[in-house]
């Protein structure tokens, strides 16, 4: 895949594939609720450019229900008439997208170079110890999900953990307690 052109970016569809069935049946209630928004988005592009809608539609689905499931992909294939692979490409390229439900608090620990050099592994170990879960897991009460991610773009304040939509920076093993205490 070209680094210059992220999926969902500037690539008009080439006539779709066997799954390109725009106007198909949508089964998922949360997607049905979003269709008026999707319809409004559609009016901004000429017919045949539905691939441009993949990224904004996926974002809205995740904002609504916290993740993008397989059935959501099925519905977007039906609605947009784009090949399923085009949606899968976007989901796998952008790590912000989640494919599984997550807990009330999603803790994403950056473990790229700058954060690693400044103690990200120790921060991750401390979070694992406190929460009793490893990366990719959710606590039994559904409150916390722990993940590791690549660079969050805040290397100057490493190590960094993204908590839902906000950054917690310059973390240390000692500051983890206060971080978790602040997440009611
Ligand atoms: S390496 Fe962690 S924010 Fe860049």
Image (cartoon, rainbow, N blue to C red):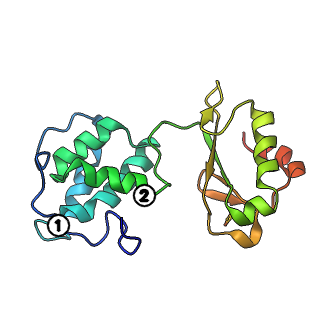
Q: Quadrant of the C terminus?
A: top right
* Residue drawn at 59 percent across, 36 percent down: 103
Q: Is residue 77 above or below residue 27?
A: below
* Residue drawn at 84 percent across, 47 percent down: 178
Ligand 1, image quadrant it occupies: bottom right
Q: Which quadrant holds residue 3? A: bottom left
Q: Which residue was labeled with disc 1?
A: 49
Q: Which quadrant holds residue 49? A: bottom left
Using the image, tell me which numbered label, if any, was put on residue 178.
none
* Residue drawn at 28 percent across, 73 percent down: 10
Mark 2 or mark 1, which is nearer to you? 2
Instruction: State which tag comes first along the sequence, 2 or 1.
Output: 1
Q: Which residue was labeled with disc 2?
A: 93
Q: Is residue 89 above or below residue 1?
A: above
* Residue drawn at 39 percent across, 43 percent down: 68
Q: Nearer the viewer, residue 182 or 92?
A: 92
Instruction: For label 2, count other residues whose C-alpha is less than 10 Å away and answer few (under 14), some (14-19) or many (20+).
Output: few
Q: Nearer the viewer, residue 23 or 138?
A: 138
Q: Would you say 142 lies left or right of 35 here?
A: right
Q: Would you say 138 lies left or right of 133 here?
A: left
Q: Quadrant of the N terminus?
A: bottom left
> In the displayed image of the protein, which residue is found farthest to the bottom?
4
Task: Tell me if label 2 and label 1 are in contact, CB under 8 Å.
Answer: no
* Cα separation between marks 2 and 1: 20 Å
């Amino acid at each position: 895949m070209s680094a210059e052109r992220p999926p969902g970016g500037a690539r008009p569809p080439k006539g779709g594939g066997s799954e390109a069935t725009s106007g198909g049946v949508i089964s998922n209630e949360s997607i049905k609720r979003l269709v008026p928004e999707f319809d409004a988005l559609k009016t901004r592009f000429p017919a045949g450019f539905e691939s441009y809608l993949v990224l904004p539609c996926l974002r809205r689905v995740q904002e609504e229900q916290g993740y993008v499931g397989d059935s959501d992909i099925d519905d977007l294939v039906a609605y947009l008439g784009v090949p399923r692979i085009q949606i899968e490409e976007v989901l796998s390229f952008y790590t912000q997208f989640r494919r599984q439900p997550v807990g009330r608090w999603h803790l994403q620990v950056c473990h790229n170079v700058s954060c690693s050099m400044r103690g990200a592994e120790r921060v991750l170990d401390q979070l694992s110890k406190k929460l009793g879960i490893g990366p990719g897991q959710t606590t039994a009460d559904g409150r916390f999900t722990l993940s590791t991610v690549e660079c969050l773009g805040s290397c100057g304040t490493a190590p960094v953990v993204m908590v839902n939509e906000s950054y917690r920076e310059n973390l240390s093993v000692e500051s983890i307690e206060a971080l978790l205490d602040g997440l009611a």
